[in-house]
Amino acid sequence: MEKLKILNLSHSHYLIESPDFSNMPNLRKLVLKDCPLLSEVSPSIGHLNKIHLINLEDCVSLRSLPRSIYKLKSLKTLILSGCLKIAKLEEDLKQMESLTTLLANNTAITRMPLSIVRHCNFCHLFFEISLLSFRLIFSFLQGMENLKYLNLSSCCRLKKTPDFSCLPNLEKLVLKDCPMLSEVSPRIGDLKKILLINLEGCIGLCNLPRSIYKLKSLQTLILSGCLKIDKLEEDLEQMESLTTLLANNTAITRVPFSLLRSKSIGYISLCGYEGSSHDVFPSIIRSWMSPRNTLHLLPTSIPMPSHKF
């Protein structure tokens, strides 16, 4: 099996121990997803000098990783999500110099290795944040300049976002279903490469920082379920890359006039309207002209959109 590059033993419900990997020197991908009885990974995994991905997702009986796994300098992605009994990662993690993606949510891990903050390569990092100290999380973020994806979803005690000035390369920010979140740091305006911000279901959030409207790279903004957000600023027109705006199930009753001038918006869900801008914008204008207008006052001069309907 010396030429084997991909080994997928997923859903092997009776697999108790992984195979010996010493005769697989060219293996690039190892997938052992959903092996519920797997309790031991062979220490020979440390011989996989060309491995790029190891996926152990939902191996619910696995309690620990062999120490030799941390010697894998070629490993780029390690997935431990759903390994309910894994309680720690070793400081030896710093030896995995190519590791860019570590997914370890839904595990028993309650402490991050200090070596993570010294690991400058991470692009994707996902832990079960509710089990970790927020102060610890935020301090670790100070060293994550290469981080591209930050998911703090379902953090029931999160009241304020971290300072984003230390995350210059962040592309996706997901803060979905954080019911206590009441403040988004004004430093969110520093995220010059951000493509997506998801604040869905943040029911305690009353407003957005004005700086968020300066994000010229942002393509998708999701505010659905933010029950207390009652307006969007006219500064929305500064978000020149915004193609998708989802803000249904909020307290917003007025469509910003600048939204209709947007040349980038392709899909919108707002004030009871949902669909492509080509379909929705004419409906909004007609509602303004209606004597039973429910989208606040008709502007004295309706800003005609640049779209051809």
Image (cartoon, rainbow, N blue to C red):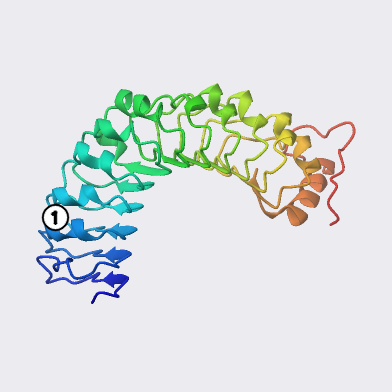
79 with respect to 173 (left or right)? left
User: Foreground residue, 9 or 237?
Assistant: 9
Residue 247 percent coordinates (x, y): 59, 42
Which residue shows up at 26% across the image and 30% down it?
114
Please state, as top left, top right, bottom left or bottom right, where the N terminus lies in the image.
bottom left
Q: Is residue 231 above or below residue 78?
A: above
Q: How many marks?
A: 1
Query: Label 1: how many residues lie within 10 Å, few (<14), some (14-19) or many (20+)?
Result: many
Which residue shows up at 85% across the image and 47% down it?
306
Helix, strand or loop for disc 1? loop
According to the image, label 1 marks what residue?
62
Which residue shows up at 77% across the image and 49% down it?
281
Res 220 quadrant in image: top right
Residue 144 percent coordinates (x, y): 41, 33
Please state, as top left, top right, bottom left or bottom right, where the C terminus lies in the image.
bottom right
Taking the image as drawn, is residue 282 in sight? yes
Which residue shows up at 12% across the image and 57% down it?
43
Taking the image as drawn, is residue 291 in sight? no
Which three-letter amino acid code belongs to the residue tagged 1?
Answer: Leu
| Outermost residue to the right | 301
